Image (tube, rainbow, N blue to C red):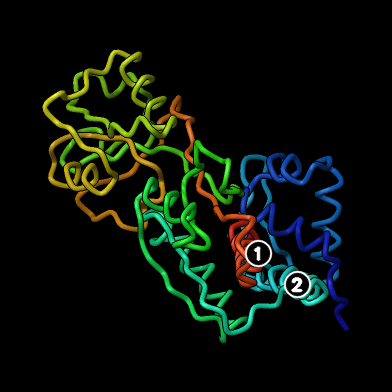
Amino acid sequence: MTEMPELSSMKCFIAVAEELHFGRAAKRLNMTQPTLSHRIRKLEDSFGVQLFIRSTRSVELTPPGETFLPLARDMLVNLDEAVLLSKLAAGGMSPGGEHLKVGAIDPAAHRLLPLILRRFRNRFPETRLDVRIYDSSELLRALERGDCHVGIMRPPSNVNLVRFRPLVADRFMAVIPRQSPLAARTSLRLSDFVGHKVFTLKRFELSSFEEVHNQITAAGIDTDIGVNVSNTTAALALATAGLGITFLPEWIESVVSSAVVLRPVEELTQEISMGIGWRADNPVPGILPFVEYADRVSRAR
């Protein structure tokens, strides 16, 4: 009879499966590579199947490994959720029939928010949810006024009233019209964009966009002064129309059309974070459970 794997071995398997590199996975888990390799071999021995194909140059999942990965993720999420529910019940914070007002910026609505809402609603079906989409500044004001109880948002500059917990971070990618000669390239540096039509998104209230703009211009890339956009959707529309190359957070992978390709740029390492905000003095009982679910869902992605 196959023994149940240890929790630590499950975490090791998931890390290697996601990184496909034992060195990076070991660093992520804060352990040595030989220890990680031993844990994986022990897990494979207990299952009686090979989970990874290893060579000196690559690591790949076997078919049994690919089958086991989503199940392993679900097992860890369910265990984490059981611990959370026990803590919530012990603290008297189990949501009931309250009306929870949830706000989100547009990027969250395409990826992170649906995952949070699904798991939260499955556990707390009696909580009435009112979900609205805001821009960043509107959402911060709604939280401060109490018009919104929790918000999936960018980090606020003013944290006097609103608490904020980071959830995920997106790297910036080059958004390239498919007809551009750069679209065929899989490896790009900033110098490759010199001489091409480029425009940037001017949202300098968010420091990451300003850093990207400054790095692009410092690399000698001339940006099109005839193009002025102030939100991601407009910038993506212009790139999709073939009017130029731009640089946007990777969450747009979920909404881009086949008219553009996304490519990482070697020197462009800036990230833009997204998290959850709430007012600590708001008494609605569903707020803190929602915050905790958002944190766990983001870590399980």
Tell me which amino acid carries mark 1.
Answer: Leu
Residue 200 pos. (x, y %): 27, 30
Residue 239 pos. (x, y %): 19, 42
Answer yes or no: do the residues labelled 1 and 2 have beta carbons within 8 Å?
yes
Left or right: where 210 falls relative to 87: left
Left or right: where 41 falls relative to 300: right
In what quadrant of the picture does the N terminus appear?
Answer: bottom right
Q: Tag 1's secondary structure?
A: helix
Work out whether residue 101 or residue 79 is closer to the camera in this orientation and state it.
Answer: 101
Residue pointed to by mark 1? 288
- CA neighbours of label 2 inside 10 A, class few (<14), some (14 to 19), many (20+): some
Residue pointed to by mark 2? 88
Work out whether residue 110 or residue 180 is closer to the camera in this orientation and state it.
Answer: 110
Residue 287 pos. (x, y %): 60, 66
Residue 30 pos. (x, y %): 80, 42
Label 1 and label 2: CA atoms lie apart by 9 Å
Work out whether residue 112 or residue 131 is closer to the camera in this orientation and state it.
Answer: 131
Q: Is residue 177 above or below residue 196?
A: below
